[in-house]
Image (tube, rainbow, N blue to C red):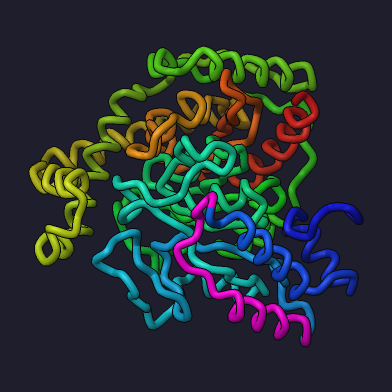
């Protein structure tokens, strides 16, 4: 710890060290800002940052008692989430310079717990299609993923320990996996979305990027009002379902090799892993996710389509118009399919602690026109349970690969505890 740069330490250690007086919030914030100044021109993770404002917040924290579980921790906020003291542009020229009059509920919770909002991280256009300016911190020729691209890249590049993202399809898990960090999408509805620009009311979920499971749990504990997540449990002989489905045919060979190595390592460390042919049709659920997302996107962005069609990307306009073309009967049927799949999963989670599955099809692809394929993420999002991706190795080009662990709806504590155990094993194997 003594020789570790301050911008590289975990949120958990920041809180511990500031509480003991061994560290100040100002020192940590200064270190993060210096790292950003060194690397931002190369990574382009930030939409807005105000160093003076962040340092004033840090000094104010240092003058008072410990405020909460995030005391002194610098945190980045995805730029579709409202902040009263910073612009919120939603990744669109339509809202350039827009300043909400309030903080989103999750931001207010962060501030109340002593977190320092360092700035706004880059998002794709309305957390949807058009990629932002951020590049992969390890290879600028590659995408960092999306839509929470800036949040993933900033955490991966050691600009700060924690960042908030959102997921409607795979917008936390995919960029976290591409960038080699932890991405945690909690159970649907656990974190209040007031102040988050909606894309799909039935799917949007606020989550986090971190470098450790403990840090990810800490931030969600605050935003969701779930203090039990601050005390992860020891895990013994967890039962993990190894999910098999036709979609795995799309995975790259190095991704399949990575998850096989992870399965073997977890089994050697005491986990019970059982092959499980999908108890639901993931292809049907993926179709349901598509229709639900597009219909609700068409409603959520109807104003922007009517008033500013020329400032929407052609791809997003097409998606909105596609969503508006579905009948109410089709939408209702797809909602029914999703509900049936969630019910069918209950029996699986009565036997298993988690499901294991690849986080992405493979390494982050080259180019910046696309943020990558969310095929391996969408159906898990539609199932509403918690999902965590943890780094598990690298691919043929040396880029990060991750594995997903998926839990039952509302069983986040168990999944986080298992994920921390798994991360300790997979990290030691690398």
Instruction: Report the residue at 74% width, 48% height from top.
Output: 232
| Residue 52 belongs to the span the image colors magenta | yes
Task: Indicate the quadrant where residue 39 lies.
Answer: bottom right
Q: Quadrant of the image for the C terminus?
A: top right
Q: Residue at x 63, y 48 (%)?
A: 157
Nearer-the-camera pick, 94 or 380: 94
Tell whether position 203 is magenta: no
In-image side of 151 versus 417 (left or right): left
Q: Position of residue 69 (x, y in %)?
A: 71, 67
Relative to 62, is 272 above or below? above
Residue 133: percent from left, percent from top: 41, 51
In magenta, the rendered stretch is 42-63
Most common SS among magenta residues: helix
The percent position of residue 205, horizontal first and vertical second, equals: 43, 52
> Along the line of sight, which residue is nearer the eye, 363 or 291?
363
Q: Nearer the viewer, residue 91 or 258?
A: 91
Name which residue lies at 75% across and 73% down.
Answer: 25
Can residue 315 be seen here? The reply is yes
Q: Is residue 207 visible?
A: no
Q: How many marks?
A: 0
User: In the rendering, at what x and y percent does residue 320 appear?
Assistant: 17, 49
Name the residue located 72 percent from the left edge and 22 percent from the top edge.
266
Vertical order, 217 against 339 (above or below) = below
Q: Quadrant of residue 221?
A: bottom right
């Amino acid at each position: 710890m003594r020789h570790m740069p301050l911008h590289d330490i975990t949120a958990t250690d920041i809180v511990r060290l500031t509480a003991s007086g061994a560290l100040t919030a100002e020192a940590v914030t200064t270190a993060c800002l210096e790292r950003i100044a060194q690397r931002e021109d190369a990574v382009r993770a930030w939409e807005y940052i105000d160093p003076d404002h962040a340092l004033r917040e840090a000094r104010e924290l240092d003058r008072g008692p410990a405020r909460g579980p995030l005391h002194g921790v610098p945190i980045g906020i995805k730029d579709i989430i409202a902040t009263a003291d910073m612009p919120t542009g939603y990744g669109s020229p339509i809202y350039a310079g827009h300043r909400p009059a309030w903080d989103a509920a999750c931001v207010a919770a962060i501030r109340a717990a002593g977190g320092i909002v360092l700035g706004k991280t880059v998002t794709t256009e309305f957390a949807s299609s058009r990629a932002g300016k951020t590049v992969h911190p390890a290879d600028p020729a590659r995408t960092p993923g999306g839509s929470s691209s800036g949040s993933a890249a900033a955490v991966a590049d050691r600009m700060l320990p924690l960042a908030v993202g959102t997921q409607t399809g795979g917008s936390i898990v995919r960029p976290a996996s591409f960038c080699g960090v932890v991405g945690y999408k909690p159970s649907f509805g656990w974190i209040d979305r007031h102040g988050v620009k909606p894309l799909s009311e039935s799917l949007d979920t606020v989550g986090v990027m971190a470098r450790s499971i403990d840090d990810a749990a800490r931030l969600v504990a605050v935003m969701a009002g779930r203090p039990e997540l601050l005390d992860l449990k020891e895990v013994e002989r967890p039962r993990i379902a190894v999910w098999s489905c036709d979609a795995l045919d799309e995975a790259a060979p190095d991704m399949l090799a990575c998850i096989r190595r992870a399965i073997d390592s977890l089994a050697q460390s005491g986990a019970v892993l059982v092959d499980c042919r999908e108890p639901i049709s993931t292809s049907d659920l993926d179709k349901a996710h598509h229709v639900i997302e597009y219909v609700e996107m068409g409603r959520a962005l109807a104003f922007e389509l009517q008033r500013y069609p020329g400032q929407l990307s052609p791809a997003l306009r097409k998606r909105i118009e596609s969503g508006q073309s579905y009948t109410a009967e089709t939408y209702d049927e797809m909602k029914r399919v999703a509900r049936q799949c969630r019910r069918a999963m209950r029996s699986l989670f009565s036997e298993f602690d988690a499901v294991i599955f690849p986080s992405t099809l493979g390494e982050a692809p080259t180019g910046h026109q696309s943020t990558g394929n969310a095929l391996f993420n969408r159906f898990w999002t539609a199932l509403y349970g918690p999902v965590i991706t943890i780094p598990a190795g690298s691919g043929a080009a040396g880029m990060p690969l991750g594995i997903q662990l998926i839990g039952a709806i509302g069983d986040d504590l168990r999944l986080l505890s298992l994920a921390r155990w798994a991360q300790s094993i997979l990290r030691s194997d690398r």
